[in-house]
Every structure is written in structure tokens, then in C-alpha cells.
Amino acid sequence: MRLFCICLITLFVLFPMHASATEFRGLFEPHRVIKIGSPSEGILETVDVDRGFFIRKGQVLARLQSGVERANMQLALERAEMEGSIKEKQASSVLFQGKKTRIERLYKKQLASPSEMEEAEANRIVSEMQLKEALENKRLAELEYKHCTEIIKRLIITSPVNGVVVERFLSPGEYVRDQPVVKIAEIDPLNIEVIIPAVQYNSVKVGMHATIIPEAPLSGRYTAVVKVVDRVVDAASGTFGVRLEMPNPSYRLLAGLKCKVILPGK
């Protein structure tokens, strides 16, 4: 029995079931940090967020002054909704079409002259052209209204992502040109940056799962996935970088904190 136990221990030493996991130090970082400006120049009317605000994709962050643009939009809307000219031209077209039909019948019976026939046909054509022009003017007014609407949209700054405001650069009353208004960090998911010795390069693969243990004041164990493995090794330090990605839907984990990253062995 003693001999059997010695042999069994020897087998586990010489042929282990799996290599032990390896622990590294990592750092939580935002998935993206975006400086958001305005596509149009102008004076800020409102800035609706400040540092530390949690925001959703599409949420309004700031607005530029748009009094003139809104007045133009309302004018274009009124023009687009005008129906009087079209109804008048439609009535004229029906009237002259009826006259032309009656003159044509009389002409066939030789009760109307060729000049009357020509005049009736000319009036019909003119009325149709006037109706067409009225319809085109309405279409142009609708396009002008759409154009004004798009201009108004460009004066409203919205968030392209879910995240948290890291910094606000401008306040209401300031002029916006090329500078950002706010900076937003997308923290769901989080990136985890790790530096690993070059001798372990072949042990880390994209798609590999790792266990993450955040430092105090946070706790718990989480799972992250390797997304990026650098293909260039730093010659001075003999290390390479790895980026992992981890969901953070409740924003419980904080960017900037350190953590332990436990990668599985081979």
C-alpha cells in the first residue's frame, strides 16, 4: 500500500493534470473616452450635464442658440402646409379641361371655329402647368422644412454612447467652434490592461477567459475575455500588452482601479 502511494505521488509530479493558473496585475480602464463637440459653430444656450453624470446614448448634452433657425423652420412649415394655391390651380385645371371638351364637341359639329379650339387647348395646357408649378412649390417648401429641421438637429449635442461625464469644458454663453464641450467615458464594458513577460507570449490567446479580482474597496470575482494581444514586444522591459474586456452593466466596477488578472494555465 505504501509503495502504491509513492508511485501515485510520483505520477502527479511528473505528469500533472494541468498547469497552474498565472496571476498578473491589471488596471481597469474605460472602454472608450470620447470628447464630444458640436458639428456647428455657435453660442451655447444650455449645457444639461456635468462631471459625474450618468448618461444614455442619444441623451441631450447641450444645445446651441437656435432662435433664427427655429423661425426659419416654422416659416418653411407654414409654406409646406399651404393648400390654397394648389386647390385654386386644381379648380382652374378642371374648369379649362371642361371648356376644352365642350369646344371640341362643338368644333366637331362645326359650331366652333379653329381659333376657339386652339384657345381652349392653350388655356387647358396653361392651367395644367400652373397646377404642376404649385405642386412643385409645395414640394420645395417641404424640402426646405426638412433642411431647417436638420439644421436644428445639428444645434443639439447628444451622446453617442452610454457612459459617465468625466469633464465639462464649456458653459452656457460660451462660443463653440472646434473645441469639445464634454468628455465622456464609456465604462460598460470595461477594458483591463495587463503587462505580461514575453516568455509567456504563447500562453495568451484572443478569446481566452480570465478571472478578475478587483482591489479594495471592491470585492468579488468576475470573468473577462482577452480581446487584444500585442504583436510587438517591448525590448526594454521584455514584456507585451494584453487587453481584456468585461461587462459592467451596473457600473459597479470603477475605471482606474487596479485588479488581479488570473489567466488559466495550459
Image: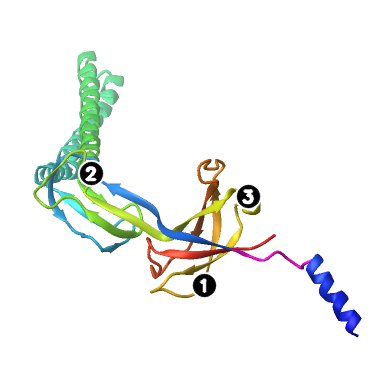
**Left or right of 185, for residue 13:** right
Magenta highlight on residue 52: no
Considering only vertical position in the picture, is 198 above or below 264? above
Which residue appears at 43% of the width and 63% of the height? 258
Give the image location of residue 112, x and y in percent: 22, 19
What is the number of the mark on residue 221?
Answer: 1
Q: In the image, 34: left or right of 149?
A: right
Spatial separation of the CA atoms under disc 1 and disc 2: 41 Å
Name which of mark 1 and mark 2 comes first in the sequence: 2
Q: Which mark is residue 231?
A: none
In the image, 7: left or right of 166? right
- Mark 1 neighbour density, 10 Å: few (under 14) some (14–19) many (20 or more): few
User: Is there a contact, CB below 8 Å, between mark 2 and mark 3?
Assistant: no
Circle 2 is placed at which residue position?
38
Look at mark 3 in the image and give the residue it sits on. Answer: 199
Q: Nearer the viewer, residue 229 or 189?
A: 229
Real-space Cα distance between discs 2 and 3?
Answer: 47 Å
Q: Amino acid at mark 3?
A: Val
Looking at the image, which residue is at 19% across and 50% down? 169
In the displayed structure, 257 sits above or below 143; it is below
Nearer to us: label 2 or label 3? 3
Q: Which range of residues does the magenta coloring cover?
A: 15-22
State the predominant SS element of the stretch in magenta: loop
Category of crowding for the residue at label 2, using alpha-carbon neighbours closer than 10 angstroms: few (below 14), some (14–19), many (at least 20) = many
| SS category of the residue bearing label 1 | loop
Q: Secondary structure at mark 2?
A: loop
Q: Foreground: 245 or 153? A: 245
Q: Looking at the figure, which quarter contains the C terminus?
A: bottom right
Toward the top, the furthest residue is: 114
The residue nearer to you, when weighing 102 against 154, is: 154
